[in-house]
Image (tube, grey):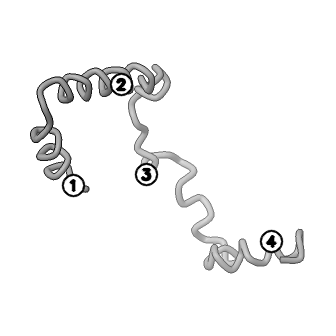
């Protein structure tokens, strides 16, 4: 369902049902309130020093193959 469809459905309900939806949304907002940790500013990872630190390594040019080889050598998969 799109947001527009949901709003259309809500608006088609009786006023009391719309109030119940408002109450339920308020309940959910309180229940899933983000923690202070989640509200911290996002870090631009592209500015971090570790990004690209292995770009010159020949054995890591194909990261998918590298991971596959590590898994196979450690777990036989």
Which residue is disc 3 drawn over? Answer: 46
Which mark's residue is nearer the viewer, 4 or 2? 2
Query: How far across and down, in percent of the image, does residue 76 sit?
Result: 89, 76
Query: How far across and down, in percent of the image, does residue 49 sit?
Result: 53, 47
Which mark's residue is nearer the viewer, 3 or 2? 2
Q: Secondary structure at mark 3?
A: helix
How far apart, in angstroms, are the residues tagged by discs 4 and 1? Answer: 43 Å
Residue at (60% x, 71% y) in the render: 56
Which residue is disc 1 drawn over? Answer: 2
Q: Secondary structure at mark 2?
A: helix
For this rendering, which residue is in front, 56 or 66? 66
How far apart, in angstroms, are the residues tagged by discs 1 and 3? Answer: 34 Å
Tell me which numbered mark, 4 or 2, is placed earlier along the sequence: 2
Q: Is residue 28 left or right of residue 10?
A: right
How far apart, in angstroms, are the residues tagged by discs 3 and 4? Answer: 26 Å
Q: Are marks 4 and 2 in contact (CB under 8 Å)?
A: no
Which residue is disc 4 drawn over? Answer: 70
How far apart, in angstroms, are the residues tagged by discs 2 and 1? Answer: 20 Å
For this rendering, which residue is in front, 19 or 50? 19
Q: Which mark is residue 29?
A: 2
Q: Is residue 54 left or right of residue 36?
A: right
Tell me which numbered mark, 3 or 2, is placed earlier along the sequence: 2
Quadrant (top left, top right, bottom left, bottom right) of the C terminus:
bottom right
């Amino acid at each position: 369902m799109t947001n527009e469809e949901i709003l259309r459905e809500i608006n088609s309900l009786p006023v009391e049902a719309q109030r119940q939806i408002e109450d339920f949304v308020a309940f959910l907002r309180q229940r899933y309130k983000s923690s202070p940790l989640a509200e911290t500013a996002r870090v631009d990872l592209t500015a971090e020093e570790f990004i690209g630190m292995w770009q010159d390594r020949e054995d890591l040019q194909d990261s998918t193959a590298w991971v596959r080889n590590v898994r196979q050598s450690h777990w036989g998969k």
